[in-house]
Amino acid sequence: MNLALETAKTIVLIVSALFPIVDPLAGSPIFLSLTQNIPTSQRWILSRAIAVNSFLLLVGSYFIGTHVLAFFGISLPVVQVGGGLVVVSTGWLMLKRGDDEHRVDVQRTLSREDIARKAFYPLTLPLTVGPGSISVAITLGADAPRNYGFIVLPVVAAIIGMAAIALSIVICYGFSDRLARLLGPTAMSVIVRLSSFLLVCIGIQIMWNGIKALLTSVVH
């Protein structure tokens, strides 16, 4: 009974900690604005590829993130500063885009290589799973209980929780065009601009968290 309870707690903890940061519902207008020039069928393929990439990034960060950082001698605050810079630059570029760039009437078919490339950068990293999500996943993995059930149940619970996050990405991104039709072009333009501005703010906040931790370590 205790093992089942701990497993459920781990799943709820991972979903509740990561879902608000990944936030695929808020990311769906940005996803649509960056993929308006491809057919709906390929947008679904792209959303599934993003979900798979996000799942692998989160799982890798959760289980081996601390070891990778230790191997390269990189601290978590440095990851936050570097990742925050990437998020800020991406949000700034999207904020500067004109409305004309979002209204593309001619659709083109992407090759498998194009889908794989676009699915990872920038659609997976940093727009879906950014430095904030990676930092949280690394922290959760470092704090995960490892003293029962030969760590099988915690591993399974963590994978289930991150699979739930990936499923939410597929659903939100796959139906992003229906959301756009429901809201209309004006509302979508406002949401994309607001989301881009918030992305810049999030990147600055992530950078500041890292800078503050680095300054604190220097002072002490």
Image (cartoon, rainbow, N blue to C red):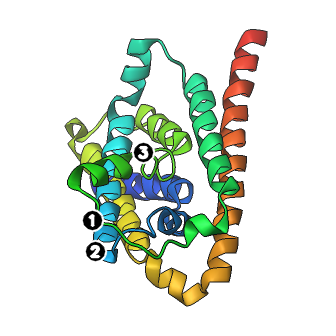
Q: Which of the two discs, 1 and 3, labels the residue nearer the N terminus? A: 1
Hey, what amino acid is under mark 1? Ile
Instruction: Give the structural element (helix, strand or loop) at label 1.
Output: helix
Instruction: Give the structural element (helix, strand or loop) at label 2.
Output: helix
Q: CA distance from mark 1 to mark 3?
A: 15 Å
- In the depicted view, which residue is nearer to us: 23 or 177? 177
Q: CA distance from mark 1 to mark 2?
A: 7 Å
Q: Residue 42: x and y, percent? A: 29, 68
Q: Residue 38: x and y, percent? A: 37, 68
Hey, what amino acid is under mark 2? Ser
Which residue is rendered at x = 33% and y = 46% of the image?
Answer: 117
1 and 2 marks in contact (CB < 8 Å): yes
Q: Tag 3: Cα neighbours inside 10 Å, few (<14), some, or many (≥20)? A: few
In-image side of 207 versus 175 (left or right) = right
Which residue is tagged 1? Answer: 45
* In the depicted structure, whether residue 29 falls above or below residue 59: below
